[in-house]
Image (tube, coloured by chain):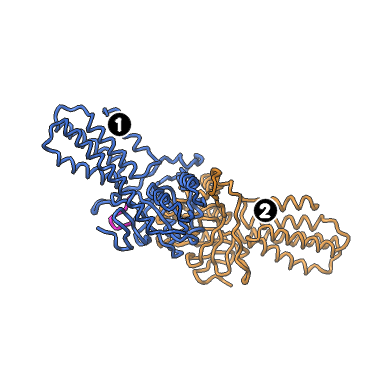
Chain colours: A blue, B orange
């Protein structure tokens, strides 16, 4: 993985509108594993300098995505335990630690989905917004348990349609809504289920724009909202809240009009007070009891 | 206006997805004026029978739209005052009464917009959803008063883009949002402004799907919500709540998938408790004080 290949991967990471934060974090770890194996360096110190530089570039590329910062920071810490190794062995151990991080993240998704599926049980009507890989894993576990799903499109890129397509393959009956209809259908659900891009330290949810509207609508109807995500998505205490990423306005497909500014902010913040349960790989946490 | 022309007009009325309830009500009155002038009949009784039949067909065609029922019912009542007239004079008077109704409706929009503009004042940032002809009239009155507007697209047909285009012509700065971003931007507004398809007797609002989400979002941020519409849009006490119209699901442009049902309900209901002020041609009414 030379400089050019890394710069290309970095650009792709910045531009990615499809994969969620955990998937992107695993991609970053894979880039670092391959960098550890292949970056030219005469000494260990030289190699570490370049790897830490790449690590910081990856974190900064998607600063709003807590899993990238958390998993990469863990990897940086893990590197300090490798101090005694000669360069070739150090390369292979550093790559191994990055791949351990990938497996740890994948396992956390599996465990989170298991806890969430157990918490939901059978015969439920579930409303969700957009597409989350963790929510997808939950639906896969529930596919034989007589669930029905209502999912909104999630403009501008309509990731909800991708979810609907997967549900169709799993024979899970599904209603596909415009985002504007979330309020209409919220009261018909037994619960709302959302994944997370990140969680703020107080448990507030950063997720695809529209999540806050769904949260308000189910709250107004007394329908509980569950948020399922691995603990890697918790932002550390004491950090400033992340800036919410704004993407290319051309994605809206709006006409070019003078004095009209199309907006395309991808994420919104759902206050913790609207969330009934947080579910991660360690289990189910009731409102106000998210572990520190 | 023979039977065939009337049936065609009735079909167009049922299929209309662009015009608001008041515009459609005025179109109904125009159809009835032309019917009164031209429907073949040997006696006044025969003519009245046919006109009342057409009147009922028009009301039933868009049963959820209170202005159609209200303005056409007023016209039916006005006809009873014409009892003594010979057939040709009766035709012309009945047509005149229908056209009086059209003018009365237009005047009510103008007066409502005046009261609303006065209530809003200058230098405000206003968030709205979809397109309402009354809201449009308000913005025209405020165009030299340093307002800024945030408007959401309103999927599936994106009437919000039509509003943005008109605002651009009036040199009013505007931000165009996806419906999913309404929650993100609600807190930045000084007030939310919505028109109405209908008002329920308690003041609850039937309007384009997504209105309820905007109402929840501004309420959560302490931003007031004004609803402006002519009093003709109030549904009579004692009627069952109207069924919310569902349009052709193909408008969503979703792929055809087994067990996936795209939904396309056009309207939602915003509870009166989320509304700060109702404004009609008689003036401004504070929360809980909508005149009976």
Displayed quadrant of residue B232? bottom right
Of all chains, the one bearing label 2 is B
Where is residue B132 drawn, in percent x and y? 56, 54
Where is residue A215 drawn, in percent x and y? 42, 58
Q: Main secondary structure of the magenta part?
A: loop
Q: Is residue B162 visible?
A: no
Q: Residues within 10 Å of mark 1 (few under 14, many from 20)?
A: some
Can you name the residue that lies furthest to the right here?
Answer: B42
Looking at the image, is A194 positioned above or below residue A93?
Answer: below
Identified at 53% across, 52% down, the residue is: B130
Q: Which mark is residue B14?
A: 2
Please name the residue that numbered disc 1 is placed on: A7
Identified at 55% across, 55% down, the residue is: B208
Q: Nearer the viewer, residue A194 or B241?
A: A194
Residue range in magenta is A198-203
Can you name the residue that lies furthest to the left here?
Answer: A84
B279 relative to B41 in the view: left or right: left
């Amino acid at each position: 993985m030379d400089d050019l290949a890394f710069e290309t991967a970095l650009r792709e990471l910045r531009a990615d509108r499809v994969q969620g934060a955990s998937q992107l974090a695993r991609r970053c770890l894979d880039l670092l594993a391959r960098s550890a194996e292949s970056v030219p360096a005469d000494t260990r110190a030289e190699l570490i300098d370049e790897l830490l530089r790449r690590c910081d570039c990856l974190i900064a590329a998607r600063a709003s995505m807590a899993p990238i910062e958390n998993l990469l920071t863990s990897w940086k810490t893990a590197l300090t335990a490798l101090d005694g190794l000669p360069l070739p062995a150090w390369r292979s151990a550093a790559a191994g630690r990055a791949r351990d991080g990938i497996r740890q993240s994948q396992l956390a998704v599996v465990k989170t989905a298991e806890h969430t599926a157990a918490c939901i049980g059978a015969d439920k009507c579930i409303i969700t917004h957009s597409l989350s890989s963790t929510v997808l894993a939950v639906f896969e576990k529930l596919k034989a348990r007589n669930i029905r799903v209502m999912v909104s499109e999630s403009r501008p890129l309509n990731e909800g349609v991708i979810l609907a397509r997967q549900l169709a393959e799993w024979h899970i009956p599904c209603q596909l809504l415009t985002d504007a209809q979330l309020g209409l259908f919220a009261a018909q659900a037994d619960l709302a289920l959302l994944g997370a891009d990140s969680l703020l330290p107080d448990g507030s949810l950063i997720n695809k724009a529209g999540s806050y509207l769904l949260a308000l609508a189910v709250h107004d109807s007394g329908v509980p909202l569950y948020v399922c995500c691995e603990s890697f998505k918790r932002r550390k205490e004491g950090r400033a809240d992340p800036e919410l990423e704004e993407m290319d306005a051309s994605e809206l497909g709006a006409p070019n009009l003078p004095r009209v500014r199309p907006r395309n902010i991808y994420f919104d913040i759902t206050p913790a007070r609207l969330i009934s349960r947080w579910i991660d790989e360690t289990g189910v946490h009731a409102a106000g009891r998210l572990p520190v």
